[in-house]
Amino acid sequence: INDDELDAGASEPEAEPESDTQASEDAATNADAGGDRMDKDDASAEELADLDAPDVVDPSEMSADRPLVRIAKKVQKDNIMFLQLFNEGFVEMTAAWACNVQHMNKVLDRTLFLATDQNAYDQFTAFAQSSGLPLVIHLEKFEAPAQMRYGQMTYYQFILFRATILKAMLVNKVSVFLIESDAVWFDDPVNYLLNEVDPSADVVAMHNDYNSATNINGGFLWLKATEGTTSVISRLHSGFSRRIDRLLKTGKDYVGRAGNEQQFIKHLLFSKSYNPNGLAAKTVMLPSDKFAPGTWFKKDYRASSLKPLVVLNNWISGNDAKKNRAIRYGHWFLNDDKATCISLDPKVPSAADRAVARDWKQQDLLDKARENKAINNNIGEMVVVQFVTTETIANTRAWIAASPAALQHTIFVSLDQNAYAGVQGIMSDTGVSVHSVGPSGKVREPLVHRASVIYTLLRAELSVFVVEPTTLGLKTEIPRLFQGLPVTTDVLLFPSSSLLSRTMGLFKASERTRRAFGQFVLASQKYRMNKITTLPSIKKKLEKVNVETMTEAQVSACLGN
């Protein structure tokens, strides 16, 4: 099926599910040819009675000394510990996801990869070594056949195994963010989750599709270690274990939806008639325009959610089908050797990095930026950059005198040798030390040079605040800038600025911004300047960048002076 047919609303090709231990809604929504939806089903009275029964667990599994719990406590930061379970059949998909988020510095260091068999553990450990990614991997064995699919008894036993792990985390005050690797993360969602989501929520969930208010997705589920959440998972564990005990007595291997855990969770969280013992777990549903289910891949849904943070690769069955769709949409980040990562943009890094290296002392720039970066309360790690030319030396001198609070974190990048000599002269005359970087040769095109500098810093995970020397100065301390800036903003331009020229503004180190500037730098090696911004590939990348332009009043408030 080609992209035009997909955009016209054709369904994705279905494939047989492979060894998928990701206890997901995928299989549930694709298991029946008629496409029955779980939110149309009701749990039986017998199933609901199971939820009221006392939960019986092995005390050793809940112990704070359990190695899994100890590791999870170390990984948890800001009440977030991403947990991803996988078996041998999902090693490749999990590796591709790790490559996807490799530059999101708040994701991997909060992620615990839990292998459920020895082969999965060994293969993923080998991938971590070959790729160089800092991955936290733990083995927690669950005996299961290599091929396991929704509806099989083994599948539901795995769900119970997972519920036991979740309960062990929660009773030991570890908040669990359950994620799955069949997804693409366009940007780091941590800032959004910490700043935009109601902090009083016990459970933060994602819609399984655009049209269901309560049909939650099990592949992106934040379970905070609160009394309410712990009660929900304990009752889930109780109901599920009793349900499986009865199903085992039937002697059947395939039981269909008879053990569906999502029905249990739905009733525990949303049913008005079922709220035993005063159970109260506040649930917040994430907006589908930012956290999109797999129906996003259809054109009408993509139009309503152009800039999501996360998109699940669900509503399609089978590892091969998921991988093929990810490749087709540019969402696959693992090389064919299955040992190393594709760059976030395969066409950009090597060519663009070679291009920028020709124009200035790249390592000198990076060293100064890393040594003098600021930690901004709203943006994270950032530097201030001022581009200097021969014509603006006098303005730069005045700006330096007016901006003592900003000098520690400002890098002056000269676009010609005379400008570089002028900055050295300012330091000699005034005795003020500033961080200055000059070109290694003649700058062929100032616009490309500016974009190359920004691109290099963005690649180093540093947001860039570009200021013009013609401004009156920057009196506010860097950590206090940009109060109230929406977390979804990639680029914040000041009045009379444009994205690539006459630039004064903030460029956040988001994946979208990096890609746009990388494509521009690469294209500059092949085309004349008057053609670059009309290229479809460049326009497409720029259109994906979330650009905001400030008013004069907002500028004053934003800068604090």
Image (spheres, helix red, strand yellow):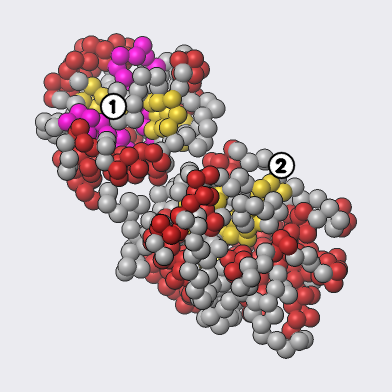
Q: Residue at x 16, y 36 (%)?
A: 528
Q: Nearer the viewer, mark 1 or mark 2?
A: 1
**Residue 118 appears in the picture as rendered:** yes
Report which residue position mark 2 lands on. 200
- Give how far across and how far down residue 275 sits, in percent: 85, 55
- Give how far across and how far down residue 207 sits, in percent: 63, 53
**Residue 58 appears in the picture as rendered:** no
Q: Earlier in the sequence, mark 1 or mark 2?
A: 2
Residue at disc 2, secondary structure = loop
- Give how far across and how far down residue 156 sits, in percent: 67, 75
Given the current orientation, which residue lies at the most extreme left position? 442
Q: Quadrant of residue 507?
A: top left
Report which residue position mark 1 lands on. 501
Q: CA distance from mark 1 to mark 2?
A: 44 Å
Q: Residue at x 48, y 43 (%)?
A: 307
Q: Residue at x 54, y 56 (%)?
A: 295
Q: Which residues are magenta?
A: 445-474
Q: State the mark number for residue 226.
A: none
Q: Would residue 461 be counted in the magenta stretch? A: yes
- Give how far across and how far down residue 294 sits, in percent: 53, 57
For this view, does 469 lie left or right of residue 556?
Answer: left
Q: Is residue 164 above or below residue 402?
A: below
Q: Would residue 189 be counted in the magenta stretch? A: no
For this view, does 314 lie left or right of residue 437?
Answer: right
- Of the residues shown, which amino acid type is indicated by label 1? Ser
- Of the residues shown, which amino acid type is indicated by label 2? Ser
